[in-house]
Amino acid sequence: MPFRTIDYDGVFELVQMKDAIDAVRRAFVDFESGMFEMPTRIALGGSQVLIMPTYHRPTGSAVIKSLSLNFDRTPPIAGAVLWIELSDANGLIIDAEAITALRTGAAVGVATDLLAPPEASRLAMFGAGAQAYFQVQAVNVVRPLTHVKVVDLDPLRAERLLARLEILLPSTSVSVELDGNKALIDAEIVNCATTSLRALFSIDSLPPKVHVNAIGAFKPGMRELPDELFAAATVVVDDPASVLAEAGEIIEAVASGILAASHLVPLGLALQQPPNHTPWTVFKSVGIAVQDWAVAHLVAQRTV
């Protein structure tokens, strides 16, 4: 079977963030409507190797993403996305780092567009690693940003992200804030993309009205958000089954009785039936294969 390879740069030549957001939004609705077959992803080596398959029934197409995670190397994500179709013997092998960056950012863009106040323009970005740039980019697509504050334990990494954001957002005020609680003072949107094992901020530091995206705690034992936030916020997730199996902060909040599993709102359902949400909203994502399919589908459509 012949396969064409699409490298990192090739993915970004074919797919812009706005297109990825639109595609991921449609995929979440399709997922909620039962159009995908998606088993829970396979995690090996303490979740350092992940295998994520899904099949889209209407198009007869599937993706299988295999990647390794090592936050002590550059890039931390490496692997491949296999794109196959029942109607075509040809396939694609696509760079997994690029697909992951776009699909993770896009999910945050979808959730922010749904849950953040329409006038929101001030972002606190916790984490300056590989995903942060795309997280900010996605939020800016749906909520044009006037201010961005970057918080990271590594000042040099934060400054490197700042330099990239100054090019991406030339009309936006961007700065580094060493104190995470201070970064929240006037935030309207908060993004968390870290490898933290403990809450990144105190709930007392949150403004009266704010939307929080959390993508970093993708395995048991990791956490970014304080328990008290789950007790007070409307919590939307990419997939309840996935976060209950993998997201440390959700697992702990449910186990302690702070959060009822039945109160987790799937993003695909929320897009069709927007919830009457509280002033604090949370989108918690561990990343699911239907997001990879959505971006890979765009790549396949645009590959000659």
Image (spheres, rainbow, N blue to C red):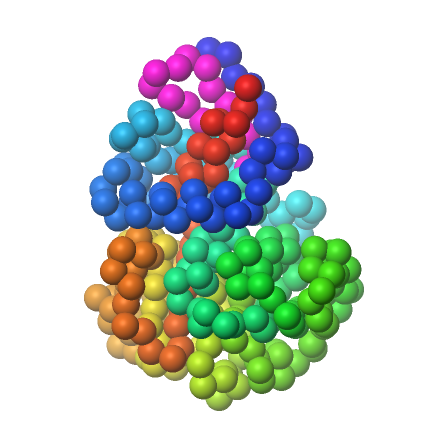
Q: Where residue 75 appears, x then y in whole percent?
A: 66, 45
Q: Main secondary structure of the magenta part?
A: strand
Q: Where residue 71 appears, x then y in whole percent?
A: 62, 52
The correct choice, above or below, for 88 with respect to 104 in the image is: above
The correct choice, above or below, for 32 with respect to 91 in the image is: below
Any part of residue 212 in sight: yes
The correct choice, above or below, for 48 with respect to 285 in the image is: above
Residue at left offset 39%, top offset 72%:
281
Residue at left offset 46%, top offset 15%:
90
Residue at left offset 44%, top offset 61%:
113
Q: Where residue 63 appears, x then y in whole percent?
A: 41, 31
Along the viewing direction, whichever of 183 and 222 lies nearer the viewer = 183
Residue at left offset 25%, top offset 69%:
263
Residue 115's quadrant in the figure? bottom left
Magenta span covers which residues? 83-96
Q: Where residue 176 appears, x then y in whole percent?
A: 72, 72
Tell whether 158 sits left or right of 110.
right
In what quadrant of the picture does the C terminus appear?
A: top right
